[in-house]
Amino acid sequence: MFRRSWRHAAAATAALFALTSITACSDDPADAEDLSGNRAGAMENYAAGTQFKATEPLSFSVLYNNHPNYPLKEDWLFWTELTSRTNVSLEKVAVPLSDYNQKRSLLIGAGDAPLLIPKTYPPDVHAYVSSGAILPISDYLDLMPNLKDKIEKWNLKPEIDTLRQQDGKFYLLPGLHEKAWHDYSLAVRTDILEELNLEVPKTWDDVYTMLKAMKAAYPDVYPFSDRWSQPNPAGNLLNLLAVSYGLEGAGWNFQHVSWNAQAQQFEYTGATEQYKQMLQYLNKLVSEKLLDPESFTQTDDLARQKLANGKSFVISANAQAVVNEYRPDLAATNPKAKITKIPLPIGPAGEINPASRLENGMMISSRARDSENFVAMMQFVDWLWYSDAGQEFAKWGVEGTTFVKDAAGKHTLAPDVNVIGLNPDAPKHLQKDFGFYNGVFAYGGKPELVQAFFSPEEQEFQQVMNARAPKAVPPPYPLNDEEREQVSLWETPLKDYVYQATLQFVLGQRDFAQWDAYVAELKSKNMDTYLETVNNAHKRFQENT
């Protein structure tokens, strides 16, 4: 679950916006610039599928997100092998995970940021665009043939367009997935299903039918008692339902606007008919005592205790929660219990996979453009983060040391290497002892790479989800700095009121006959002006592309 705060850049002048809007979506090729003085160490014939190796030893600085689960070690095989393969060494500016965003802002603001700034989420980029501190990376895509190849082959242009700023350029190199990877859903006690002769529910209506049957058999139990309710109420459950009803997101992924394809405009998510229907569904579960009303406020520990003690049978889940929490909890109290994460139930939006195919990515300091090694650096980034070979290296490591391949090319961890419990008795760890499968370098890719360390159960789940149509990508609406600053003043009171009213409607504290009054309250909190700003930005983007 990724809950990221939006940062907001300073306002710029209207004249500048008028000038920059003219260039929207014009990815100027790098060869239109004179890069003759920036090619030191670069390969002359670098192309997609080519092993990158600098023609001379090079070193690039990188902001390193130091994860507490595998703290940085200078003697990792990752570093030495990376240099051996690419002739590049990385100068790490290590920052603890807990301080990463704050430290990144301070370094960029002071002009002291490393050249490479990974682990950046799209909203975080906004704050740095107007200052000129980061590179408009879309101007240099011709230096990155592996990236361009994947965008084209995987039809990622609509997703890439969502990264564009008001000047039409994008400033983030995102992680790319060939297939959307959706993890969160519901976990269900399958032994109870077997006992009651019930099928795994396929739709949200089926979930209701299942809960009714469980309640009839166990009248003293709330069949569904949920977790992940803090700091946002029912964070995961509301988000799952929102996307199932055709909205962009709710709960911990609350999105202020959702695209109405029929009306060809954005609508305010919390005021839509779909949002109302979603709350009516939840209210039905609560009023019939199928969903524990404490689901919207209780701690994770309490929700887990209820599941472990047979006080509930259904709970929000991701793959790790099932394996690392629910099954051990149940094994300690009820060894015969079985629990499984089910495919996301289908709602009015149909069989969709709601996950994005973009992931967090990398900003590049604008100082890099003046380096004599700029072209070589871009080739290096392209190879490590976007080539098949680079992605395999970052995740699996070195063949014969950390993994082996069979005759069909299938990868398997070396028997003396463990990661996420695949070889639990192995003396070495892929992340802690070798530095591979590191979140700074390993993300995105083809499904077989992304799912390489998934259990057979999770791979089956992903197979079901990947067979579904990807959720339509909403069109871009790049805001200029002045607009972004303004909407930031409206977002918090709007969101807070949506959360407040959501709880009231779901828990029966407010009648749905008051829905129009609720929408009027949103209007009084600048909802209409917010929408007008977003829709005008969308129209402006269309006119300039």
Image: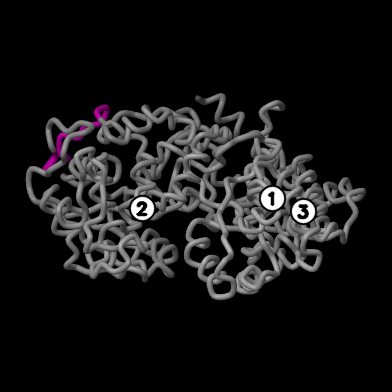
Mark 3: give few (<14), some (14-19) or many (20+) Cα within 10 Å.
some
Q: Quadrant of residue 534?
A: top right
Mark 1: give few (<14), some (14-19) or many (20+) Cα within 10 Å.
few
- Read off the magenta span: 31-42
Using the image, determine if residue 404 lies above or below residue 244.
below
Q: Mark number for residue 197?
A: 1
Specify which label sits upstream in the sequence, 2 or 3. 3
Where does label 3 land, which residue? 213
Where does label 2 land, which residue? 453
Q: Which is closer to the viewer, label 3 or label 1?
A: 1
The x, y position of residue 174, in whole percent, is: 40, 44
The x, y position of residue 142, in whole percent, is: 28, 31
- Judging depth in this view, the residue of 187 and 302 nearest the camera is 187
- Residue 34 in magenta stretch: yes
Q: Is label 3 in a helix, a strand or a loop?
A: helix
Q: Can residue 261 be seen by looking at this rendering?
A: yes
Specify which label sits upstream in the sequence, 1 or 2. 1
**How is the model colour-coded?**
one colour
Mark 2: give few (<14), some (14-19) or many (20+) Cα within 10 Å.
some
Q: Amino acid at mark 2?
A: Phe
Residue that appears at 67% across and 46% down: 242
Q: Is residue 242 left or right of residue 356?
A: right
- Residue 279 in magenta stretch: no
Number of numbered tags placed on the structure image: 3
Q: CA distance from mark 3 to mark 1?
A: 10 Å
The x, y position of residue 342, in whole percent, is: 58, 49
